[in-house]
């Protein structure tokens, strides 16, 4: 494979250091090394993106939709080489990566449908009222336009679905924003393959080359320079809290601050209601272990916290969890760095005098993460904020509460979360009604009798939540609504029809839904 | 009149210093002095707002709409005392303030309609697909919920429409957010009258008292404490760039950063196209002077910059403007401080060696602002960024360009703006087509053959724009879309119907529009 990055149409071998993939299962450094971008490379990518913006943002809906679909087709056309490279670079199994490829393609196609539908433009028309007293009303027409070039920092844990052509890229391109991807250093070969697929789709669709670029960064300078570049108008990021907040700080310190959509940390509380525990403690425990250990626990929505009222039913849940967890083999984690951080975090929790180790998964060597299940008291949890810190991996902490009031206090003490899960039975409805207002304040998605892992890509999904789960609670990074992050409203007043964009012309040539005087 | 502020239902006389209205026409200090809030007052307002939030945000649409309409009715019921107090505190004439009262009431009623319509909730339903292969799909339902308590800093220049019960307050209340107003110190008596009207509407509608509070601040501590308060979740502000950025900095430094919607500075370029100048230079000049001097130039959308290509037609525009401006009497400005800042800014521009004074309005004493019209060359304008600084008042600068390219360069050099106006004739369409992409990047509203003053309150209005015209280009502070600033999405997955909010129940008891599988 070629060690290329893409500055617009040009395949470039970076000259500023390099990044290499590492097979986490074997420790083997993978060939080839991928040369990193210079600041001049980053500058050129930003210049091309800026130059492409005005043409790209006015592409006809069908043309833009076909472009997104072409990316999906091109990714599939890479064939097994993509799956094998991703397996080698991430340690994730074939079935997971094939599924993730399907998800990535489905995501691009969902946004193609959204572009064709036009609803995302939020079109509004308030026609002129020349006879109105005491003053006539002007003709007012509103559409949303894209913000401008977007820089995307891919995630390590979704090398396809939240990386080079993942959710941030797909939604930004759908909105009409050129995209510059800073490829994640943990899967450079996977990134190069997908980057080429996107670059080829740009060319095949006759779009300006600056619609897409992808760079490697051997340090942090090139990526940070892009966030600071005045031609860049928004940032998408999935990763750690530290990484996300560093980008937010750069974006806010610019002469013109820009939005950063950083999806950061979340421990995704799971609340077990008494009646549900009574009826099916064992089944919940089994489901919990399956969710906790999925993908070696490397999900943003991994259930890192369980909250319940003490009693024999909760003991049955713990026993069931311990039994299931004891059978779970250690699982290879994405990178040596992630494994080391997980091992440190789990060890610190285990060493906390207020914490007991309730169960462990099977051990393993190298980058294999050992699952862990801890318990603590509500009093200890409320006292020690460090127990709320995410352990990225298959570790979770049960907080034992004395009663419903203490459970509510624990929920109230939580930081913002991507998800909150409730396990409930009919007899728990009143207790849940009391908790829901609190959960709505805390989480972007509230789910019942399930776990947050498994994020459907659809119109009604929210993968977002109050700080620090994301840097902007008003948004989602997964699902159709994600496109709204990259848009802003513009109003045209008394503009001659010939000068109006098609979406707002009197004859509505695109046939899009429009709100006329506030009515559909 | 009583010197009261309102901490929830309680009328309180502040004990932390005081603020007094000053009649800018006479210099007279108006009675009574209004006591300022202590930090304890601010804390109590935040506590009440937080306590009211969960109940208020789940009010039925009709109840919330009636509440907004009751505020409008109560403001009208204050009667002439409100108009007279506002005249005394602002120097604005009766007709303007009566019009502004109507606008304020219209705004509240528009949001009542929006609340009844329910479209702002952005409801989405993706029903379960239990048979889907390879994995079933969960039932997913999305609504937008309000962010939480909002602090509003009213504007000096709209003592009714963008103050205590103005656009920020109306849209936040409509969204379901309790509001705490930091009353503008320039019109405390007007604020107290309107604050009481809102307070009484809260009580009449049987809502929790914390839905509304209003404080005076003799310094900055109470207002800043509210922005920093963890129970406050968003801020609305209209005022200076310095003031807005100070609040943004506080909001971003919080452990949980929150959005600040600051509408700050804009010079609202007016671009005169050649054919339009040829056909009607004189009429454009007259219209320009009327817009420039409206309300002593104290509008966010005041036309502070004119850009055109040199030639005899532009000279005719200048002559027409000079003639009309020479007849404009000096007009009382809102406060001595605003007048002083305006006089300083206009003098600095006049003293700039690259600037010529093309015309002045009539002089006056005290707080009366003398209108001014300056000219400079494109080369000088491009070199000296200080010429882009807003002079809040009736002053404007004409930038004479050599040709269309230089005009485009001047437009490209501009910071973000609330509005951009184009004066054009049929023969100018091609030139405008070339400029529009640039203008869309720069401004939130692009208007033709008119001026930005006069901001319609309707569904398609955008009163917003790229930084520094606002702190968040993705939003508007005027018009129906303003409600979106105070909302965030929440997804409910597999939630039993009995536990779902009414807007998302299977039977759709509220009858609201919902996007089902992405289709309306």
Image (cartoon, coloured by chain):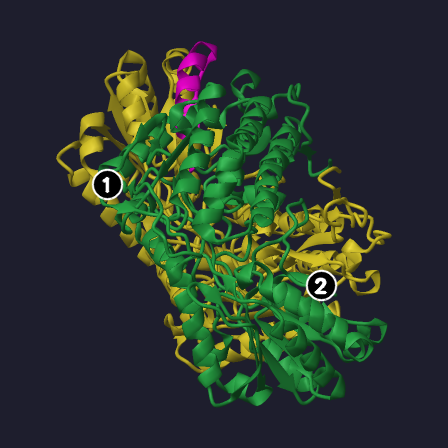
Chain colours: A green, B yellow
Which class describes the residues within 10 Å of circle 2: few (<14), some (14-19), or many (20+)?
many
Q: Main secondary structure of the magenta part?
A: helix
Position in image of residue B149 (x %, y %)? 57, 66
Give the labeled residue for mark 1.
A39
The quadrant in which the C terminus of chain A is found is top right
Of badges 1 and 2, the one in the foreground is 2
Determine the residue positioned at 41% across, 15% down: B276
Badge 1 or badge 2: first in the primary sequence: 1
The magenta-colored residue range is B417-439
Q: Are marks 1 and 2 on the same chain?
A: yes
Looking at this view, is A267 or B106 the one in front? A267
Looking at this view, is B290 or A119 the one in front? A119
Q: Which chain carries label 1?
A: A
Looking at this view, is B69 or A47 the one in front? A47
Which class describes the residues within 10 Å of circle 1: few (<14), some (14-19), or many (20+)?
some
Q: Which chain carries label 2?
A: A
Taking the image as shown, residue B440 lies to the left or right of residue B100, namely left
Q: Within the image, what quadrant is residue A191 found in?
A: top left
Query: What element does badge 2 sit on?
Result: loop
Query: What element does badge 1 sit on?
Result: helix
Position in image of residue B154 (x %, y %)? 48, 59
Taking the image as shown, residue A298 lies to the left or right of residue A179, namely right
Determine the residue positioned at 54% across, 68% down: A394
Give the labeled residue for mark 2.
A450
Determine the residue positioned at 30% across, 17% down: B404
């Amino acid at each position: 494979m070629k060690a290329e990055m893409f500055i617009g149409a040009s395949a470039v071998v970076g000259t500023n250091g390099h990044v290499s993939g590492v097979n986490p299962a074997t420790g083997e450094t993978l060939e080839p090394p991928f040369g990193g971008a210079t600041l001049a490379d980053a500058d050129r990518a930003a210049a091309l993106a800026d130059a492409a913006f005005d043409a790209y943002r006015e592409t006809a809906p069908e043309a833009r939709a076909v472009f997104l679909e072409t990316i999906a087709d091109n990714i599939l056309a890479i064939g097994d080489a993509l799956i094998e490279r991703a397996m080698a670079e991430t340690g994730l199994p074939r079935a997971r990566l094939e599924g993730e490829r399907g998800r990535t393609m489905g995501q691009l196609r969902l946004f193609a449908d959204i572009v064709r539908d036009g609803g995302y433009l939020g079109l509004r028309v308030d026609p002129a009222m020349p006879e109105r007293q005491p003053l006539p009303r002007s003709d007012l027409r509103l559409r949303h336009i894209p913000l401008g070039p977007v820089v995307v920092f891919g995630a390590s844990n979704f090398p396809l679905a939240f990386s080079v052509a993942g959710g941030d890229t797909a939604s930004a391109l759908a909105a009409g924003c050129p995209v510059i991807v800073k490829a994640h250093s943990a899967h450079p070969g996977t990134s190069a393959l997908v980057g080429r697929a996107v670059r080829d789709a740009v060319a095949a669709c006759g779009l300006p080359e600056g619609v897409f670029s992808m760079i490697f960064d051997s340090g942090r300078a090139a990526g940070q320079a892009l966030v600071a570049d005045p031609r860049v108008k928004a940032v998408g990021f999935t990763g750690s809290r530290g990484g996300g907040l560093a980008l937010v700080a750069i974006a806010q310190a610019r002469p013109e601050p820009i939005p950063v959509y950083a999806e950061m940390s979340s421990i995704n509380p799971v609340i077990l209601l008494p009646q549900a525990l009574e009826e099916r403690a064992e089944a919940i425990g089994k489901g919990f272990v399956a969710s906790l250990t999925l993908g070696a626990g490397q999900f943003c929505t991994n259930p890192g916290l369980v909250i319940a009222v003490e009693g024999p039913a909760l003991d049955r849940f713990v026993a069931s969890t311990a039994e299931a967890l004891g059978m779970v083999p250690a699982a290879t984690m994405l990178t040596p760095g992630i494994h080391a951080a997980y091992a440190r975090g789990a060890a610190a929790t285990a060493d906390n005098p207020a914490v007991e180790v309730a169960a462990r998964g099977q051990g393993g060597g190298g980058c294999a993460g050992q699952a862990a299940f801890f318990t603590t008291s509500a009093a200890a949890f409320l006292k020690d904020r460090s127990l709320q810190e995410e352990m990225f991996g298959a570790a979770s902490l049960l907080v034992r509460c004395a009663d419903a009031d203490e459970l509510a206090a624990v929920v109230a003490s939580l930081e913002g979360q991507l998800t909150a899960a409730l396990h409930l039975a009919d007899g728990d409805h009143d207790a849940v009604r009391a908790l829901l207002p609190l959960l709505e304040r805390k989480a972007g998605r509230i789910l019942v009798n399930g776990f947050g892992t498994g994020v459907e890509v659809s119109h009604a999904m929210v993968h977002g939540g109050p700080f620090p789960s994301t840097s902007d609670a008003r948004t989602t990074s997964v699902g159709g609504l994600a496109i709204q992050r990259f848009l802003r409203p513009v109003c045209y007043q008394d503009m001659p029809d010939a000068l109006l964009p098609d979406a707002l012309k009197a004859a509505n040539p695109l046939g899009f839904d429009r709100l006329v005087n506030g009515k559909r």
